[in-house]
Amino acid sequence: MGDTIRIADAARLFRSTKDVIQIRETLQRRGLHLHIATDAWSGFDLAADDPQTKLFVTVLAGVLEFQRDMISENTKEGVAAAAASGKALGRPAALDEAEAAKVVNAYRDGAAVKALARRYGVAPKTIRRVLDATGARDLPNIAEPPDGTPGAQQVTQPATAVVLDMPGLLAGHLQTTRDPAVRDALHNGRTIRRGQGYSVRVTAPLALHQAALQRCVALAGGAAPAGRKAYRTYAPRIAAAKTQGA
């Protein structure tokens, strides 16, 4: 009679109508039977070769495939709606934006990775992830004014103007920055629309771009994927401009 294969749920096996046809052909060649352990179809041999069973299995597979497609579509719409409303997706960050900014600043002041991990009660790899996300180990140190706020006017980079596109999310974050040089550069920049988003083409010394990036470090270590992506888009542009000017 042949052995019988039992599955708990047809949806776990029937990924598409094409899969159903191939599975049935394989089972029939080997003389095997296929039964669903639960639901109203538990008494059917889904590997039977009669026309009625073939029609039933094909319709069942089509329904299950339609259900999976609807679930996938609804999930994508839900994720897009959450992202549009500013909700953070995925696992919560071990360090919030303010802590991430402090970690980067402390590292640039000479603090060791393991010491920072002990200070914030996280694993060293978490600290390294924040530093790698911000490119803190690649960017040159920026001098700070007396109040401890990084400023573009205190850096020692050459004053040659560099044209770089700053992601709109970073530009929006910098609208209220206390650095007047960064604000002026954004005000004089050219807004470029890109689909639903935008960027600001900023013409300024490389040092000012570095100062602007430093002020966005909290976004790189935050929980919002859009902020991290925007930071990681701008940081390589600055690094490339520095390499070209070296």
Image (spheres, rainbow, N blue to C red):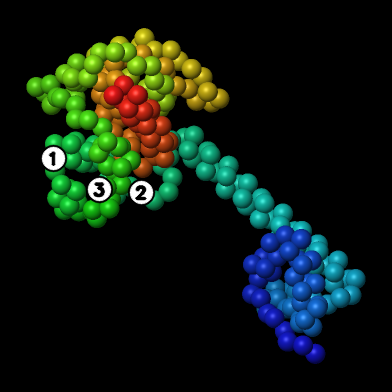
Label 3: few (<14), some (14–19) or many (≥20) C-alpha neighbours in 10 Å: many
Q: Quadrant of residue 215?
A: top left
* Amino acid found under the numbered disc labelled 2: Pro
* Amino acid found under the numbered disc labelled 3: Ile
x, y percentage for residue 30?
77, 81
User: Of tags 3 and 2, which is closer to the observer?
Assistant: 3
Query: Of helix, strand and loop, which one carries label 1?
Result: loop
Q: Is residue 9 above or below residue 101?
A: below
Residue 67 visible = yes
Contact (Cβ within 8 Å) of mark 1 with mark 3 = no
| Residue at 22% from the left image edge and 30% from the top image edge | 140
47 on left or right of 222: right
Tell me the distance, in whole angstroms, between the alpha carbons under discs 3 and 2.
15 Å
Quadrant, the C terminus: top left
Residue at the bottom extreme, as displayed: 1
Query: Of helix, strand and loop, which one carries label 2?
Result: loop
Tell me the distance, in whole angstroms, between the alpha carbons under discs 1 and 3.
14 Å
| Residue at 63% from the left image edge and 46% from the top image edge | 73
x, y percentage for residue 158?
23, 16
Which residue is at the front of the view, 172 or 38?
172
Which residue is at the front of the view, 105 or 68?
105
